[in-house]
Amino acid sequence: MDLYGRDFIVTQEWALDELQTLLDLAARMKRDRFSPRWTDLLAHRTFLMFFYNPSVRTRLSFEAAATELGGHAQFMTPSAGRFKTQKQAGETIEDAARVMARYCCGIGIRILEDKVPYYGAGNEMLREYAHWADVPIINMADDRFHPCQGMADLLGWAEWYGEGPGRPNYANLRGKNFLLTWGSGALARSWCSVQEALLVASRFGLNVTIARPEGYDLDGEVYDWTRQNCAANGTSFRIVDDPESGYDGAHVVYSRNWVTAAAYQDGLFQKQAEIEKALAIPGWTTTAARMARTDHAIFTHPMPVDRGTEVSDEVASGPRSAIYDVAENRLHVQKAVMALTMGNL
Amino acid sequence: MDLYGRDFIVTQEWALDELQTLLDLAARMKRDRFSPRWTDLLAHRTFLMFFYNPSVRTRLSFEAAATELGGHAQFMTPSAGRFKTQKQAGETIEDAARVMARYCCGIGIRILEDKVPYYGAGNEMLREYAHWADVPIINMADDRFHPCQGMADLLGWAEWYGEGPGRPNYANLRGKNFLLTWGSGALARSWCSVQEALLVASRFGLNVTIARPEGYDLDGEVYDWTRQNCAANGTSFRIVDDPESGYDGAHVVYSRNWVTAAAYQDGLFQKQAEIEKALAIPGWTTTAARMARTDHAIFTHPMPVDRGTEVSDEVASGPRSAIYDVAENRLHVQKAVMALTMGNL
Amino acid sequence: MDLYGRDFIVTQEWALDELQTLLDLAARMKRDRFSPRWTDLLAHRTFLMFFYNPSVRTRLSFEAAATELGGHAQFMTPSAGRFKTQKQAGETIEDAARVMARYCCGIGIRILEDKVPYYGAGNEMLREYAHWADVPIINMADDRFHPCQGMADLLGWAEWYGEGPGRPNYANLRGKNFLLTWGSGALARSWCSVQEALLVASRFGLNVTIARPEGYDLDGEVYDWTRQNCAANGTSFRIVDDPESGYDGAHVVYSRNWVTAAAYQDGLFQKQAEIEKALAIPGWTTTAARMARTDHAIFTHPMPVDRGTEVSDEVASGPRSAIYDVAENRLHVQKAVMALTMGNL
């Protein structure tokens, strides 16, 4: 298997054994973080991080990943350049991507819903970069997908159902029950993390339950892929519309606020309207009482956590909370992606 | 002595022999800046710099320090993240600190008076980070203290009263006279540098004189600590309220503008009011005529210098000005702090 | 020849054999990009990049250059500091430069016309930094000159008239015809790149033709230097005022929008007025039809390209377009400059 030069835009477009290779390397890297086997893989190489949307965790983990592989990650925001849009003269993505590829070994891009005129436009932009750049494009979260988060989630769950940090067991996840539940709150969050979680949970053999208020369904194509993944694994897929029943017998509980499919109007992401809509639906909080209905489930969340709203402090900081381990796994997963696609490993 | 994992928030909380260890290492590093003894101490490690307030000198010296130790310093500003405040949903310091600690070997924080609602709130925030993070928290200047500046000052004075750059003599400082004088000007400056200077001067055996206009007294607890340090060393501590007399017989003259204790109102730092207050008190400038009253004193300042107002050009660029040496020492002192607390030296 | 410690502010101030040394090293670096001969030249050293004006390409190529030489480039903007101006208290360039030089091995500065009160003030500021700093000052583009772009241009042309990437032939450029033509468009661009192109083209023996609408003449001193260079080489220099005739027999065609000499009024760069002035002069576009008049010329441009206005897509993406090679050469040229002036090579 040779993953050199591959883009990483959504997990669904990588074969299962390719994802498994990535996860296995990430776990080995976690067990032996500064081994000379990987500390020179990107020596003297530049990884370019393009942040249309800022992010502490994503920047910190990608930049640290490059450093730990011996390379250097450059931080760039589009305001630093002059890109062509319908309203202003500037550089085309073709020209930007072809030049950047001459300087660096890979490009990470982060662009979320509030920076694009319609749902999916961010993901389309990543694909245009991937079309023109000779180096891998890594999705650092777009308006549809967040593959590195999905891989970090899965590694974390497999560690908790395995022998602990760096010792995941993926077979133990098969047949377990995954609950993705909408969470109350005023953050008007993106679909990318939760959609990627649906894809990886279904891909790796978990039964999938989505709990959300009416009107809060996600991307239809992601639902279709999730159904296909479940069918291929002989597992179940269902959607419930109450905040309680999904917890029954769950093994992995994931709660997170997200916006409705009606979030775009007139070419603009309507953040304030989405916040008001969500504030009218309180009570979708993961509490200890709800966790008590599960089969001793772990709690997972891509962070930052909106404590008291998406989840109670008792659960988020409780003995079955996997949130810090999952967060740490972003680093190891991203190191593995970079090592495989750029490091010639 | 093992300083691995220690926070560095104010010099007063480190034992004298710990500070001496730090200073000795800094001087050795200055004498042999790129020795292989230290160029790999932070290899492949990430030091996170969190700048609530921007600063050219602090960023440059910390980032260079990490580079010279073989590591990498990441530059982050809080606007890049979503932190919880009373007014907005976001991430708690607990969650931010616990995750950051998974990615990096230490965290530097800079937060000054204009970013906090009351005096001391910046320092409290550093201590909350220190409570939750498993890695050292380094104070890159808060509203109360600036320990790296204090150490750089002291190293500089000891070099000037020793055998020159990299050859400090601390014994020679004992019994010398230190003058900290308020300076005129429109910069409404923080207390952190001057307060740290009082602590290190008194700690290392200098007699302390503070000269300031009425109303310009500093933090009472810092005065108390300074008095205690002087008492322990058998040295003197006094406060004068005229701009002349303090110079008599001084060996180290430090002039700097700072604000009054009344600078906060309604939860806001009143910068403009403080500027106006200070502009009504001209004439507190360190001039050659005033320096002539001293015992051949050196001139020290943490920079940036407000030339013509805090100090005349003749003194700032004169043959007894230690300002550039002190500035350079920031680098060496910070390398030593990082090597000891993060580099397992 | 020893270039250690030299500033690089404009090519005209370096001797021809010094420029040739720089170009030869750049070509060797391009042929063997990660050779251990250069990957440690700046090990543990900091190169400071000071961006008064942002730029994706310049930052990316300088920061990658430092990384590939084993060092680290810090990104700084002046808003991060407190510099003295006529209107505000702050630090002098003397103090800033003298302190910075204690921390780093070299300083790059980028400052364009919209950040200065009159033409040439940016270049003057670079020279003030160069006066005070003990380390080399590298011009990353000012309001007059862009020496790294000029060297990248020349290396690219010599590769196209040589044996391809990394195999330039400078002798073949002698006696060739260079056309610099003004380009239509709404970008109100700086003079720095085109002026540097005039200097290097004339310096290395090409005949020079400038085509521009009336009122669009460049810096008189640059014209004088270009004439002198042509005289020394026995080549021709002429200026035409129509958008067609300059193409006849050209071997290198360079099109680019730029502003008039009247761009400054009342101490401000009048960007909007310049845009309107230029929009009234359409039709100065490099098209395939115009390229057909040349002697099989290559097309060159410093990028970003304003496609459809300065040049047609057909030419910019055509088989004789050197734009991506020239862009890549920025990296190699800058590595060579840093290696020679800071790396003790």
Image (cartoon, coloured by chain):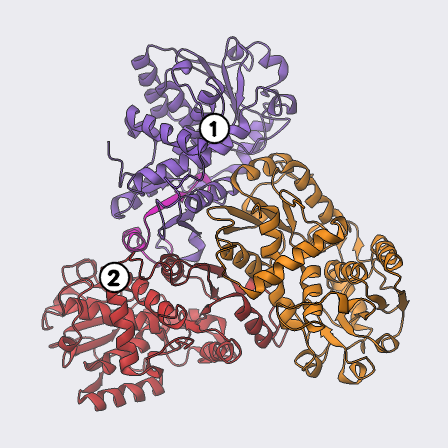
Chain colours: A purple, B orange, C red
Can you say whether A331 is above or below C254 in the image? above
- Asked if residue C23 is positioned above or below residue B272 in the image, the reply reads below
Horizontal arrangement in the rendering, residue A337 relative to residue B273 (left or right): left
Q: Which residue is mark 2?
A: C30
- Give the amino acid at mark 1: Thr
Picture coordinates of residue B123, whole percent (x, y) = 72, 48
Judged from the image, the secondary structure of the residue bearing numbered disc 2 is: helix
Count of numbered circles in the view: 2
Residue A84: quarter of image? bottom left
Where on the picture, by quarter, is residue C231?
Answer: bottom left
The numbered mark 1 sits on a residue in which chain? A
Task: Classify B241 as above or below C34.
Answer: below
Residue matched to label 1? A260
Of badges 1 and 2, the one in the foreground is 2
- Indicate left or right for A58 with B52 as reference: left
Q: In the image, which residues are magenta?
A: A87-114
Residue C281 in view of the camera: no
Q: Chain of mark 2?
A: C
- The Cα atoms of the two marked residues, 1 and 2, are separated by 51 Å
Q: Residue at x 49, y 71 (%)?
A: C115
Residue B249 picture location, percent across and down: 85, 77
- Position of residue C119 measured from the top left corner of the image (x, y, whole percent): 44, 80
Measuring 21% from the left and 58% from the top, which residue is drawn there?
Answer: C313
Residue closest to the eye, A314 or B148: B148
- Label 1 with label 2: CB-CB less than 8 Å: no
Q: Say which amino acid is labelled 2.
A: Lys
- The answer to if A101 sits in the magenta stretch is yes
Tell me the SS state at disc 1. Answer: loop
The answer to whether residue B190 is magenta is no
